[in-house]
Each structure stands twice: as C-alpha cells, then as structure tokens.
Amino acid sequence: ASEAKDYDVIFIGGGVAGYVGAIKAGQEGLKVACIEKRGSLGGTCLNVGCIPSKSLLNNSHLYHQILHDTKRRGIDVGDVKLNLKQMMKAKDESVNGLTKGVEFLFKKNGVDYIKGHGAFVNEHEVAVSLIDGGQTQVKGKNIVVCTGSETTPFPGLEIDEKKVITSTGAIALEEVPKKMLVIGGGIIGLEMASVWSRLGSDVTVVEFLGQIGGPGMDVEIAKNTQKILTRQGLKFKLNTKVTKGDASGQGVKLDLEAAKGGKNETVEADVCLVAIGRRPYTDGLGLENVGIEQDERKRLVIDQEYRTKIPHIRVIGDCTFGPMLAHKAEEEAVAAVEYIKHGHGHVNYNAIPSVMYTNPEVAWVGQNEKELKEAGVKYNVGSFPFTANSRAKTNLETDGMVKFLSDAETDRILGVHIIGANAGEMIAEGTLAIEYGASSEDVARTCHAHPTLAEAFKEAAMSTYSKAIHY
Ligand code: FAD
Ligand code: NAI
C-alpha cells in the first residue's frame, strides 16, 4: 500500500462536481486525480441527464412544431416524418463531443484521469478497481467524494430500461410507445413526458401531490404550466398515488388510488417511466472504512465547508444536501477547491436557479409565494404576461408570464418565477439581481433592449412597486 501515488486532492466521481473540481484544482496548481468508473467523464449530467435530455427536448419540439405550428406562420410543409434513429444519433453526438471535451480539459489542466471504481481503504487511501482490469491505489492529502445519485426505485416494479424505464431508458427508447405512463410529475417526469408525447405517444402523468413540477415551483406557475401541457396533449392524474405496479404481462399495469380517499383504478401502458426522485449513490465506496455519516435519506453529512467528520474528506454534488442540479454541483466544486487551497469559498444557496426545459420553459430563483407565506414574510407581487410583450407577439409565442416577489418594506427581490419561451435564459438576470441584493426598482430602471422577451422581465419588476407601461 505504501506504493500508492500521492496527490494533493483526489476526486471520487467524474460527474459535474468531480470534473469541475478537478479542473479547478489543476488550475490552482494542486496535484490532482479524478477517479471515474463509467468509462466516460461528465457523470449523469453529460452522459444520461441534462445533455441528452435537452437534445431530445429540442429536436422533438422542432418536429412537433413543424407538424402542428407552421400553417399560421405562412409555411406549408409536405411530408414530415420522424427518424428516431437519427434523432438519437444527434443526441449521442452532442454527448460524445462534450465528454471528450472534458477529457481534453483534464489533459490541459494536468489532471490524472483514473478509469475505475474507487473505494476508501482508510482516511487517506483509495483503492481503484480499474476498468481495464487490475487494481491501483492512490493517496490523497484531501479527498472529495462526488459519487452522485441514482433513480429512486418504485417498490415492486423492476427496471429493465425497456418496458419499465428510468430517465436513462427514456432517452434511449428505440420506438415511440403507443401509450406511456409516468410515475411522478416532477422535472424528469414532465421533460420526458413532453419528449415522447411530441413524438406521438399517448402519455399520462400520475402525481401524488396536488401540483406538478415538484415543490419548488410556484403554485400559480405550476397551474399555468399544467394547462399549457394539457393543451399539448399530456394527460394528468394529480392527487393520485400509485399503489402497485405489475410488469409481468405484455405491458405495464399500475394500480392507482386517489390520495384523499376516492375511487381506485388500474391503468395500462406499453412503457412506464419511474420518476419519483433521485437518491444519493454511494455503493461500494467503502464508507464503513472511514466512518462517514449518512442521514435518513442516504445523504452524506457535511458542514458548511463540505467537510465530513474527517476534515480532509469533503462531499459535494448530488450525494449530499441541496438541490440535485448540475450548476449547484459545479459551484460547490469550485468552492470546495478554494476551501482546500485558500481556506475560504462561497456558494449562495439562495441564488440557485431551477429550469424545466418543457415548452414553454419554466424557470425560477429564490423563494415562491408558499414559502414566503410560511416564513411570515410580507411581500409584493408584480407580474407581466407575454401576451403583452411585443417580441412574444411577433414570435407567436405568447404563452406565459414573469412574476416578481419582493420584500414589502425594502423592495428587495425575494423570488422570480417565469413561464415562457426562453425562461431558462431569462432567469439568469433574476439570479444576478438576487446575488447582488437588487430591488425590483433596480431592475425596472435598467434599460432593456427592444423588442426582446426580457422587456417582460423589466415590466414585471416595474409592476411590483409601480405600474407596468404596456399592461
Ligand atoms: P453525477 O453526475 O451523478 O456524477 C457522479 C459520477 O460518479 C458518475 O459518473 C459515477 O459513475 C461516478 N461514481 C460513482 N461512484 C463511484 C466510485 N465509487 N468510483 C468512481 N466513480 C464513481 N441538472 C441540471 O442542472 N439541469 C438539467 O437540465 C438536468 N437534467 C437532468 C436530466 C436527467 C434525466 C437527470 C437524471 C438529471 C438531470 N440533472 C439536471 C441533474 C444533474 O444531472 C445532476 O445534478 C448532476 O449530474 C450531479 O452531478 P454530480 O457530479 O454530483 O453527480
Ligand atoms: P422530483 O423530486 O423533481 O419529482 C418527483 C415527483 O414524484 C414529485 O412531484 C413527487 O411528489 C412525485 N412522487 C413521488 N412518489 C410518487 C408516487 N408513489 N406516485 C406518484 N407520484 C409520486 O424528481 P425527478 O423528477 O425524479 O428528478 C430528480 C432530480 O433530477 C430532481 O431533483 C431534479 O433537480 C433533477 N433534474 C433536473 C432537471 C433540470 O434541471 N431541468 C431535469 C431533470 C432532473
């Protein structure tokens, strides 16, 4: 074991958290290694998450739009056909380009990329079972755990990624299922339901809660979203619990129960997507050899500086607290390296945007109305609909609105919620405003180019403390 190569810092996991941390450490002049068992860098996000799903969302939207939304734009199209194989190939090309890009960045920044499964031997040493066979051992002054997350399984429904699928199967189906059931109306459920519904599947989303989009989404925005997605052909069963699944026959059967008592029913489909959340992944990591704590949801327990009970072992990304988002993992990675190198780092957990890449997109940052009410905060609401925005009108994309929540006394922005075309880009301005502690008046007095969708953002801010001009 004394043969082990020495590093200043070792990252276990080469997802967004691990690869960004490794590059940053290299830039800071630290001797760094990153251990990844997948055979490709970028983790869930680049390989089976953010990137492939956005490729399919973009191209399925284009297909759906060409089929259903060209006539009124003055474009007559002929025979439109889906070539699913090619759509999947385009997705794979985006993924491969990006994962190879990360490998190049590792070389550029002097990161040792160790391909294999890492497990703690003791507080400083990690044994790696190499993908190509054999073992090696590395030693780190600092070790950062970033092993990510996995789909939470639904009891009784075995995942085969063909008939009963997770998001990983949902980005790789070989044909469009006639009927599809989605358990869970959160972000994965809605993004994947959108893709397959646009490509022709009859999709029903079953959600336990009374609203779609998960708990962070503002109720008013969630209702708006549901209305628009229903118009697009998606079906929803809210306040409904899936009690049992059966995939033993040709398709998949689900037993449903109304959450607050009511009638039970059984529904059937060719394919069922399980999207009821994700949980930290730490299998075979040898946590028992170092005594790192996990909470009741399997999250690795850390302090404000990402340290476990063993101060030189830190944890970042999906396998610890906070939202399971790629950009959150990325921020933590930079901060963790800064703590290691300089003793201080910074992530503002109040200013982490969320984006759902449906059509229209839904995006938010900061708090929603329910959260503010629960916290007893007095707030003002300002909003502006895209129907009154000139660019949205010219684009024939007038669905949605921008909503501002600001402190009733100081006008400081507490939350921004958007549903509309390009919401995911526009939310960056809200995030910056919150990061800088801006008031809604600060935003409203900032000149925005005309004609842009961002003017709706400015006018929503204006209506928070005064009146919008165009509505
Ligand atoms: P991961 O990306 O999961 O990386 C962990 C890596 O560690 C994996 O590659 C794994 O193979 C490796 N590993 C695990 N254990 C070991 C070990 N013992 N030894 C070596 N390697 C190991 N987030 C967004 O912000 N925007 C999106 O649009 C978005 N879309 C998503 C779509 C889908 C379908 C899914 C599933 C997720 C999406 N996410 C999105 C979430 C995002 O993918 C995660 O938040 C992000 O990947 C977390 O990064 P991470 O590095 O913590 O973990
Ligand atoms: P989620 O937590 O967003 O949604 C799960 C939904 O399933 C919840 O609304 C929950 O009420 C519901 N549910 C749970 N059990 C149920 C049951 N038995 N029956 C019916 N409904 C049930 O989790 P999801 O969608 O799986 O996504 C996991 C993570 O991946 C999220 O935390 C998200 O942050 C991340 N992600 C982010 C994306 C983005 O940023 N665009 C895209 C995809 C995933």
Image (cartoon, helix red, strand yellow):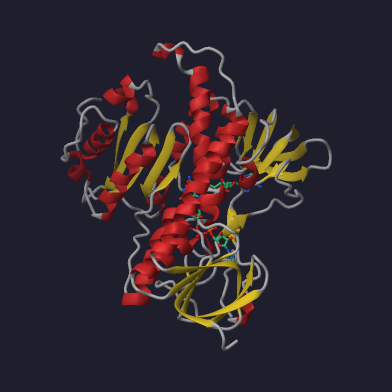
Q: Residue furthest right?
A: 249
Which quarter of the rendered picture does the N terminus lie within?
bottom right
Tell me, yes or no, if residue 389 can be seen here. Answer: no
Q: Residue at x 48, y 22 (%)?
A: 65
Q: Position of residue 412 (x, y in %)?
A: 24, 50
In the image, taking residue 179 as reference, residue 371 lies left or right, namely: left
Q: Position of residue 193 (x, y in %)?
A: 59, 35
Q: Position of residue 349 (x, y in %)?
A: 37, 59
**In this rendering, is residue 383 above or below 334?**
above
Which quarter of the rendered picture does the C terminus lie within?
top left
**In this rendering, is residue 188 above or below 400?**
below
Q: Residue at x 49, y 43 (%)?
A: 94
Q: Which quadrant of the structure image shows residue 455?
A: top left
Q: Which quadrant of the structure image shows residue 13?
A: bottom right
Q: Position of residue 269 (x, y in %)?
A: 73, 33
In the image, taking residue 258 as reference, residue 397 lies left or right, namely: left
Give 383 or 444, whichever is nearer the viewer. Answer: 444
Q: How many marks?
A: 0
In the image, taking residue 386 as reference, residue 254 lies left or right, namely: right
Tell me, yes or no, if residue 382 can be seen here. Answer: yes
Q: Which quadrant of the structure image shows residue 443?
A: top left
Q: Residue at x 21, y 28 (%)?
A: 450
Q: Residue furthest bottom?
A: 2
Q: Residue at x 38, y 24 (%)?
A: 397
**In this rendering, is residue 79 above or below 24?**
above
